[in-house]
Structures are given as structure tokens and as C-alpha cells.
Image (spheres, rainbow, N blue to C red):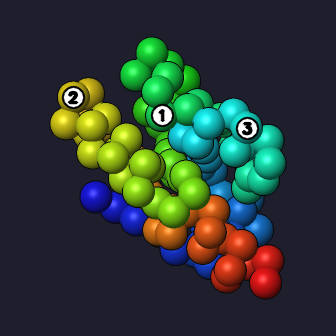
């Protein structure tokens, strides 16, 4: 599974590189704090795979990087995705490395 650090993602965003951000946390978590992108909760991701871009890197994140890793593993195994990247440490890492 490919992964990316909060600092690497921050640099991608700053350079405006093409990628899709997906937050797999629940709506209330996303509304409380997010780093952008679409919110597709883990429980709804398989019903919404058409929303995942096949043509660019898709960076998937959650609070700590655990739910996003599970989602990526399942999407790669069941649907053959090869362009998925996990945000290591999730939103917690973003807050620690980028905001603090």
C-alpha cells in the first residue's frame, strides 16, 4: 500500500498537483475539521466507488490512518485500484505536522 506523510501532502496541495482527496471519516468528524476533498464515509465507500478518480492519485485519509488503510486494502483487493494513497497518521498527523 502506498502512503504519504502530512508534509508530502501539504507540498502537493501547495504546488496544486493533480490529486483527489477523500475523507472516509463520518460526516460529523469531517464537519468538525478536515483538510479538504470529498467526504465519503467508510460505510458508504463501496456504494460510491464511481466517485473515485481512475485518472489521478486518490489520497484517502481518516483520523489516524487506520480506517483509510482498511478502505484502500479492500478497494485494491475487490476492485483492482492501483492509484490509492494512504495519508499516514491521518488528520492527527496533519494537525501535528502542518498546523502546530
Q: Would you place residue 67 above or below residue 12 in this image?
A: above
Q: Would you place residue 31 above or below residue 59 in this image?
A: above
Measuring 37% from the left and 53% from the top, which residue is drawn there? 69
- Give the percent coordinates (x, y) of residue 34: 74, 52
- Give the percent coordinates (x, y) of residue 99: 79, 77
- Give the percent coordinates (x, y) of residue 54: 44, 33
Count of numbered circles in the view: 3
Q: Earlier in the sequence, mark 1 or mark 3?
A: 3
Q: Which mark is residue 56?
A: none
Q: Which mark is residue 42?
A: 1
Q: Residues within 10 Å of mark 1 (few under 14, many from 20)?
A: some
Residue farthest toward the front in the current orientation of the protein: 28
Whole-number angstrom distance, CA of label 1 to CA of label 3: 13 Å
Marks 2/3 in contact by CB < 8 Å: the verdict is: no
Measuring 49% from the left and 23% from the top, which residue is drawn there? 44
Residue farthest toward the left in the current orientation of the protein: 77
Q: Earlier in the sequence, mark 2 or mark 1?
A: 1
Residue 3 is left or right of residue 18, and the answer is: left
- Give the percent coordinates (x, y) of residue 32: 80, 48
| Residue bearing mark 3 | 28
Name the quarter where the N terminus is drawn: bottom left
| Residue bearing mark 2 | 78
Q: Residues within 10 Å of mark 3 (few under 14, many from 20)?
A: few
Callout 1: helix, strand or loop? helix
Whether residue 35 can be seen here: yes
In the rendered image, which quarter is residue 95 located in? bottom right
Whole-number angstrom distance, CA of label 2 to CA of label 3: 28 Å
Amino acid at each position: 500500500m502506498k502512503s504519504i506523510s502530512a508534509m508530502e501532502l501539504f507540498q502537493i496541495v501547495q504546488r496544486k498537483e493533480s490529486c483527489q482527496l477523500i475523507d472516509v471519516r463520518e460526516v460529523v468528524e469531517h464537519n468538525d475539521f478536515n483538510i479538504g476533498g470529498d467526504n465519503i464515509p467508510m460505510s458508504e465507500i463501496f456504494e460510491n466507488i464511481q466517485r473515485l478518480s481512475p485518472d489521478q492519485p486518490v489520497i484517502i485519509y481518516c483520523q489516524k490512518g487506520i480506517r483509510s488503510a482498511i478502505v484502500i486494502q479492500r478497494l485494491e483487493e475487490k476492485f483492482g485500484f492501483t492509484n490509492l494513497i494512504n495519508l499516514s497518521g491521518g488528520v492527527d498527523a496533519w494537525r501535528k505536522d502542518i498546523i502546530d
